[in-house]
């Protein structure tokens, strides 16, 4: 998770401000870069080959039905990106 986040930050020219637990606070020069970062990281987390130990956790269960259009690992749903964009 941390490696994927940091690779995404570098790829989209972000700046890691602070981390707390598994949360990252990151700044980007443009809103577009921030959005591209979020999409990139979400897809990379979804495509990641997770260990069996991690997949046994409740946070990684498969979600079906109203909360998902397909079988979606809950880990992807719990890795949210929150954006706040403004112009100078």
Image (cartoon, grey):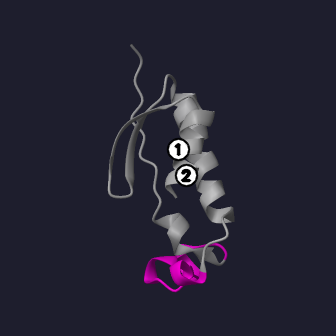
The residue tagged 2 is 3
- Residue 87 to residue 75: above or below: above
Q: Quadrant of residue 78?
A: bottom left
Label 1 belongs to which residue?
Answer: 6
Figure disc tally: 2
Residue 31 image label? none
Residue placed most toward the observer, 73 or 18: 18
Q: Left or right: where does residue 47 sit relative to residue 16?
A: right
SS at badge 1: helix
- For image coordinates 42% across by 40% down, the residue present is 83
Discs 1, 2 touching: Cβ within 8 Å: yes
Task: Indicate the quadrant where residue 86 lies.
Answer: top left
Against 12, residue 48 (above or below) is: below
Expressed as whole percent of the image width and height from the top left, the position of residue 35 reads: 55, 38
Q: Is residue 25 left or right of residue 78?
A: left
Foreground residue, 32 or 29? Answer: 29
Residue 68 point in image, percent of width and height: 58, 73
């Amino acid at each position: 998770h941390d490696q994927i986040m940091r690779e995404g930050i570098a790829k989209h020219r972000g700046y890691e401000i602070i981390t707390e637990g598994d949360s990252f606070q990151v700044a980007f020069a443009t809103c577009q870069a921030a959005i591209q970062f979020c999409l990139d990281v979400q897809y990379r987390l979804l495509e990641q080959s997770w260990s069996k130990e991690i997949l046994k956790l409740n946070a990684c269960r498969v979600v079906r039905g109203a909360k998902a259009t397909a079988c979606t690992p809950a880990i992807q749903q719990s890795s949210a990106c929150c954006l706040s964009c403004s112009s100078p």
